Image: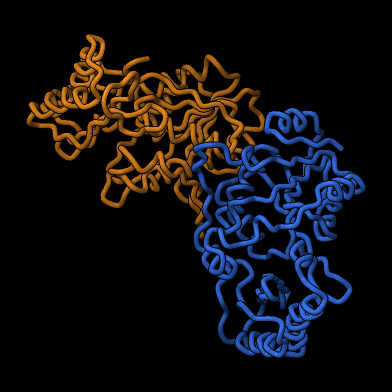
Chain colours: A orange, B blue
């Protein structure tokens, strides 16, 4: 497994890789969710490139950029075990040189949900992903369903700007008690960690109700809300029942929906989601 | 010479072309300026792709999108003579399908000069050029120095987003009396056409003064202004003496500058520029 930092090093190493090339963009501090993406890429592509970059432009000033957990040595060991060919670990200066001033902006889809809570977040995500695509020139790119809105936004960007890249979205990987894997789970103390199971518990309760015949968007949101509100260590930021592609909130009776939510557990912000109806 | 309209047709035809591939993006109604770009591409590249697309998103609602001159048959004859391999003539629906919502935005460089007069213009330009690059995947792209700010903005976009494309900027091609070639010259009546020589006359007077030792930014701007103001059919919109890369206006004594200007001749808006000091 080769590791590179600068763009010229990356381009030289990339030129040696047989295609198709799959890319797995990450911010490091890898867990089973990331590794499931890398393993899927390993199965489907002749070469696998992973990027490790804690992208400053997708964090707001008050967010956890400086505290974001890092363990590069462990990450490289895990990627080597999966059989990744090339790891690109650029510095912020490599990605955002002096006078950087170009942004890729997806409009409507980024106004809701995570974008409403984090107004500059998706501009940072789409811009860095566009750059990764242009430098690495992969045929396939792997993202997790955990960040459901990110997956929809990136698919829209790829379609609108005609990037010659196929986006593969992989299922959420969960802890045995249902908590979706996240690098930010490392922030939780034992009581918070226990309370954080309320995300998957409440979403599953809504899914059970859907499977038992409940079709009301308000009713499904209320099921999640009631369960979260009963957990004193967790504050609900939003619960959404939205169209899985447009991300617009649904009213009345639904056939298919993305149920997604964000909460605060102490200072830690956690998200989770599931799709009901197919 | 092959012509295509849809993206699948373009991708199939592109896959057959030997590299390096050069792209010459145009809005059609071709003149010697465009053809000089196509000839340069023909000399430097194994394959040449020209696009003809009057891009609606770079026109403001009050601008001349509907009146923009078109003569596809003549354009194709001229490109065939130059030896272009492939012409892509997408419809607006091919480029901007339903729900299109992704934009490439260059920030600081687009706030001044043409961008100040035409606030959404460059967003349309950079977005369509990013799309053309992603679909055609050229190694080189040819633009005219006539649109000096456009060339600087596109070079910034390519650098910031790491497009694997080399930008080649070609000199302005002028009529025998100095008027820079432009598709919009077709709008001018004979008196306006005569008056329009004031753009190159005034810029050349400033250049002559520079070569004779004048270094004052204000003085160079004043030379242009006085000559334009003496021409009753022409109204000056701006005259700029700016840094050729940052496009910031210069003060005091200059070493090197982009002198650029926009005027109205009747309803027709014309631009011209030259670089002094290197």
- Residue B214 in view in this figure: no
A204 relative position to A108: left or right: left
Quadrant for the N terminus of chain B, please: top right
B54 relative position to A35: left or right: right
- At 73% from the left and 33% from the top, the residue drawn is B10
Quadrant for the C terminus of chain B, please: bottom right
The correct choice, above or below, for B6 with respect to B185 in the image is: above
**Residue A76 at x, y percent in the picture:** 43, 28
- At 33% from the left and 40% from the top, the residue drawn is A112
- At 56% from the left and 76% from the top, the residue drawn is B249
Using the image as rendered, state which of residue A66 and residue A135 is in the foreground. A135
A177 relative position to A182: left or right: left
**Residue A165 at x, y percent in the picture:** 58, 30
**Residue B250 at x, y percent in the picture:** 57, 79
- At 59% from the left and 67% from the top, the residue drawn is B114
**Residue A213 at x, y percent in the picture:** 24, 11
Residue A117 lies in quadrant = top left
The correct choice, above or below, for B237 with respect to B150 in the image is: below
- Residue A93 in view in this figure: yes
Residue B220 lies in quadrant = bottom right
């Amino acid at each position: 497994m080769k590791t590179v930092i600068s763009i010229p090093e990356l381009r030289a190493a990339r030129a040696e890789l047989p295609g198709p090339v799959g890319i797995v963009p990450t911010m490091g501090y890898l867990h089973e969710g990331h590794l499931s993406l890398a393993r899927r890429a390993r199965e489907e592509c002749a070469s696998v490139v992973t990027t490790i970059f804690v992208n400053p432009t997708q964090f707001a000033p008050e967010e956890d950029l400086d505290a974001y957990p890092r363990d590069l040595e462990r990450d490289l060991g895990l990627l080597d075990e999966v059989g990744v060919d090339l790891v690109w670990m650029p510095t912020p200066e490599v990605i955002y040189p002096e006078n950087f001033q170009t942004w890729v902006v997806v409009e409507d889809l980024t106004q809701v949900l995570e974008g409403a809570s984090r107004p500059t977040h998706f501009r940072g995500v789409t811009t860095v992903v566009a750059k990764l695509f242009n430098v690495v020139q992969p045929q396939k790119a792997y993202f997790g369903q955990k960040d459901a809105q990110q997956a929809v936004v990136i698919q829209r960007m790829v379609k609108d700007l005609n990037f010659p890249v196929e986006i593969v979205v992989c299922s959420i990987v969960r802890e045995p008690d249902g908590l979706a894997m996240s690098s930010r789970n490392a922030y939780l103390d034992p009581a918070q960690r226990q309370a954080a199971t309320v995300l998957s518990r409440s979403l599953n309760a809504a899914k059970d109700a859907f499977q038992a015949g409940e079709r009301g968007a308000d009713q499904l949101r209320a099921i999640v809300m009631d369960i979260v509100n009963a957990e004193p260590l967790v504050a609900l930021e939003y619960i959404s029942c939205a169209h899985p592609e447009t991300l617009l909130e649904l009213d009345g009776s639904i056939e298919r929906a993305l149920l997604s939510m964000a909460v605060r557990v102490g200072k830690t912000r956690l998200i989770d989601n599931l799709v009901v109806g197919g």
